[in-house]
Image: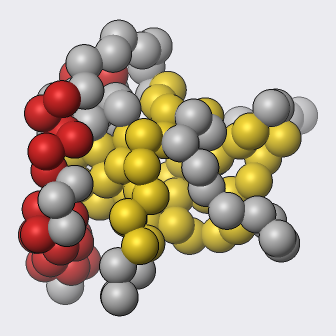
Amino acid sequence: MFPTAFRLFGFVVALSGASALHAAISFERSLGEARVVRVAHLSAADIVILDAGYETGLRQGMVCNVSRDGTQIGEVMLVDLRPRSASALILDLVSNQSLQPGDSVVVKTVSSKK
């Protein structure tokens, strides 16, 4: 079920014209770090386009924290990856916030503290 849904979102992104952005982005980033390039407002869901992808270690299904000026403003899940760009769905947003181009996206990690 989930792989089919992810393919569907990739198709939606392609139809929205966001796929042209995928080919035009070529920034180098450290593992799991990206920036928001565009937020496509579609009827089913908002799709977030990132400037990093498979080549930087991002993988489909990863959950990432989104921050602006060092303050976390939301979470996204990666649904479609290209070598140098990715598309994500918004999972959570802080009240009265919206994602904007330039927001920082970092893979969410789990740590255990003893």
Q: Is residue 91 left or right of residue 5?
A: right
60 in relation to 36, above or below: below
Residue 88 in view here: yes
If the image is split into quadrants, where does the C terminus sit?
top right
Front residue (pair 11, 41): 41
Residue at 84%, 41% (x, y): give it. 71
Residue at 52%, 58% (x, y): give it. 76
Which quarter of the picture shows residue 1? bottom left
User: How is the protein colored in the picture?
Assistant: secondary structure
Front residue (pair 108, 50): 50
Front residue (pair 9, 103): 103
Residue at 57%, 34% (x, y): give it. 102
Residue furthest toward the right? 114
Residue at 83%, 72% (x, y): give it. 95
Residue 48 in picture, x, y percent from top left: 42, 56
Residue 49 in picture, x, y percent from top left: 36, 49
Q: In this view, does 92 lie to the left or right of 71?
A: left
